Amino acid sequence: MSITLENLTRRYGASHAVDRLSATIPTGCFFTVLGPSGCGKSTLLRMIAGLEPLDEGRIMLEGRAVAGPGLHLPPEARGVGVVFQSYALWPHMDVLGNVAFPIEAAGASRSAARAEAQQHLHSVDLARFADRRPADLSGGQRQRVALARCLAAQARIVLMDEPLANLDPHLRAAMEEEMTAFHARAGATTLFITHDQREAMALSDLVAVMRAGRFEQIATPQDLHDRP
Ligand code: ADP
Ligand code: ADP
């Protein structure tokens, strides 16, 4: 699904976290928002996810308005998968249950859902944690569970807030491969935020350079490389 952002604004007091930001993200694109700490990346992603209100502007997913003047669809009605450090695995379910849930909800039997979920956990190197509760995992491990759940849900839009930031280098390389493979396989429109230029260049179809609540430029990694 495509993502259209029109004139998005979010203020905290007198300061603008996101400032009249507009962009269109094509269906299937791996789109990275690259920028320094505090430039508004997380606020932007939370607005798209439905976790943060808009002060102005409008958000459309595949041509359907989900947020705008007088309109705020809740997160679960937007059809987006999120991989955020702060957000939401189901605390009362074990890790396998969290990943199996969307597969079962889509109509699979309980045993088929759990078998498939186990495969997704394996691909994020968490098979041995299947019967733990989210509260018993580290932040990085929880993010990997959230990524496995996006794989399981076959989300058409995936939002990722620095999903690799807490990982050790070996696991980070493995996860980058996994994310690239997932994106190629599922074709989900992926919005990925990072402050790491190397990561942005390695993973993206398009990179938006963000500063002070706005996109300064949007370019392919090749173009950024040639004309930094
Ligand atoms: P980034 O993700 O790029 O680090 P954020 O979106 O977290 O940036 O923050 C953008 C700006 O908005 C920062 O100046 C931050 O301090 C401010 N900000 C974010 N959330 C809040 C909040 N809940 N209340 C007040 N200021 C906030
Ligand atoms: P992230 O690691 O995702 O960038 P932050 O550490 O920036 O998250 O923010 C974590 C939480 O604190 C968010 O809910 C954000 O809204 C809030 N927050 C961030 N900056 C501020 C601020 N200056 N004042 C109040 N709340 C803030």
Image: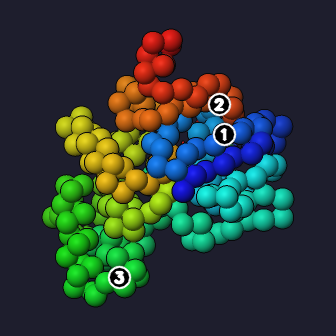
Q: Residue at x 54, y 66 (%)?
A: 79
Q: Is residue 34 left or right of residue 22?
A: left
User: Residues at badges 1 and 2 in contact (C-beta under 8 Å)?
Assistant: yes
User: Residues at badges 2 and 3 in contact (C-beta under 8 Å)?
Assistant: no
Give the residue pinned by disc 3.
104
User: Residues at badges 3 and 1 in contact (C-beta under 8 Å)?
Assistant: no
Q: Amino acid at mark 1?
A: Ala
Identify the colour scheme used: rainbow
Camera-side residue: 68 or 2? 2
Mark 3 lies on a secondary structure that is helix
Question: Residue 156's x, y, as percent?
Answer: 47, 60
Residue 215 tag number: 2
Q: Amino acid at mark 2?
A: Phe
Q: Amino acid at mark 3?
A: Glu
Task: Give the mark, 1 or 2, whose residue is nearer the N terminus.
Answer: 1
Query: Where is 222 relative to 113, above or below?
Result: above
Is residue 135 visible in the rendered image? The answer is no
The alpha-carbon separation of the residues under discs 2 and 3 comes to: 39 Å
Query: Where is 153 relative to 27, above or below?
Result: below
Q: Is residue 148 left or right of residue 50?
A: left
Give the residue pinned by disc 1.
23
Which picture quadrant has residue 72?
A: bottom right
Question: Residue 228's x, y, as percent?
Answer: 50, 13
Q: Residue at x 69, y 46 (%)?
A: 5
Q: Is residue 209 left or right of residue 115?
A: right
Which of the two discs, 1 and 2, sits closer to the camera?
1
Mark 2 lies on a secondary structure that is strand
The alpha-carbon separation of the residues under discs 3 and 1 comes to: 35 Å
Q: Residues within 10 Å of mark 1 (few under 14, many from 20)?
A: some
Which picture quadrant has residue 188?
A: bottom left
Question: Residue 59's x, y, as percent?
Answer: 70, 54
